[in-house]
């Protein structure tokens, strides 16, 4: 097993069988010690969030599998906070895909003069950002991705359609336990000629509210898994 690189919230290793292993950590994105899945840097450490993110990911990857949606998920070891996945080539130097159901966070910081915080975005709003800490994870459009040679328009449309479909699966599941998904962050990759969901579907990558208050990641995992 060889370490490929250390990420913000996970370390990545290559396996002898050609697959990849993700090691989940207790770091979260945020700012000034406050959790925010929309931020582009690690802002705090929450004990147990690594395993919580893994457990949530496994729960939703299995749900997507049952729904016929292909992902990179193979298996997981919760005790070790590791997940074995199919190898997936990232787009560019890394691309994050955010699906927003409610306007908040960085969306409002950019567009607050046009829309109030908490406004519903009917049907979901998908946006992409390059993973680049120095540049603040800049936004990029589908046309921009094609012009830069990062992905074809067809790949982008597939990624966007999958994002909306997966977000609906997660949001509908959360509704059954009285939770309201506001936004969620994904990563996609290219595997055997297909655009597929990679990385994680973690409690630390989604903004969820209950009775008007945000649910912290570890508590969110408990609510999802202990129903």
Image (cartoon, rainbow, N blue to C red):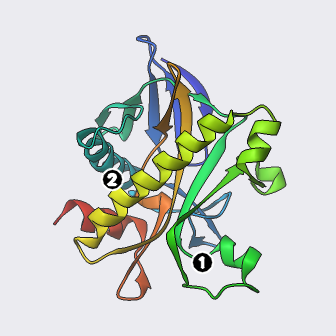
Point 55% across, 48% down: residue: 160
Rendered-image quadrant of the C terminus:
bottom left
Q: Quadrant of residue 202?
A: bottom left
**Does residue 136 appear left or right of residue 50 in this picture?**
right
Give the residue pinned by disc 2. 56
The image position of residue 26, as x and y in percent, is: 48, 53
The image position of residue 44, as x and y in percent, is: 58, 64
The image position of residue 95, as x and y in percent, is: 66, 43
Classify 10 Å Cα crowding around label 1: few (below 14), some (14-19), many (20 and above).
Answer: many
**Does residue 58 appear left or right of residue 33 in this picture?**
left
Depth check, front residue: 157 or 222: 157
Point 75% across, 41% down: residue: 145
Point 57% across, 69% down: residue: 36
Q: Quadrant of residue 99?
A: bottom right
Q: Is residue 39 above or below residue 195?
A: below
| Viewer can see residue 180 | yes
Depth check, front residue: 45 or 151: 151
| Viewer can see residue 25 | no
Give the residue pinned by disc 1. 104
Point 61% across, 64% down: residue: 38
Q: Is residue 182 above or below residue 85?
A: below
User: Label 2 to label 1, Cα distance in Å?
Assistant: 23 Å
Q: Is residue 170 above or below residue 71?
A: below
């Amino acid at each position: 097993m060889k370490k490929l690189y250390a990420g913000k919230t996970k370390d990545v290793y290559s396996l002898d069988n050609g697959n990849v292993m993700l090691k989940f950590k207790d770091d979260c994105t945020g700012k000034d010690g406050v959790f925010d899945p929309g931020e582009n840097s690690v802002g705090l450490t929450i004990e147990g969030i690594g395993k919580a993110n893994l457990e949530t990911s496994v729960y939703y990857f299995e749900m997507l599998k049952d729904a016929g949606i292909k992902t990179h998920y193979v298996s997981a070891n919760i005790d070790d906070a590791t997940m074995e996945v199919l190898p997936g080539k990232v787009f560019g130097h890394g691309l994050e895909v955010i699906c927003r159901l409610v306007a908040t966070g960085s969306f409002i910081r950019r567009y607050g003069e046009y829309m109030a915080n908490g406004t519903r975005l009917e049907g979901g709003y998908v946006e992409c950002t390059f993973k680049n800490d120095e540049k603040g994870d800049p936004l990029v459009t589908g046309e921009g991705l094609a012009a830069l040679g990062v992905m074809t328009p067809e790949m982008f449309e597939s990624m966007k359609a999958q994002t909306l479909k997966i977000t609906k699966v997660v949001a509908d599941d959360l509704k059954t336990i009285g939770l309201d998904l506001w936004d969620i962050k994904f990563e996609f990759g290219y595997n055997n000629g297909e655009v597929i969901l990679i990385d994680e579907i973690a409690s630390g990558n989604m903004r969820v509210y209950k009775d008007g208050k945000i649910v912290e990641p570890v508590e969110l995992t408990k609510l999802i898994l202990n129903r």
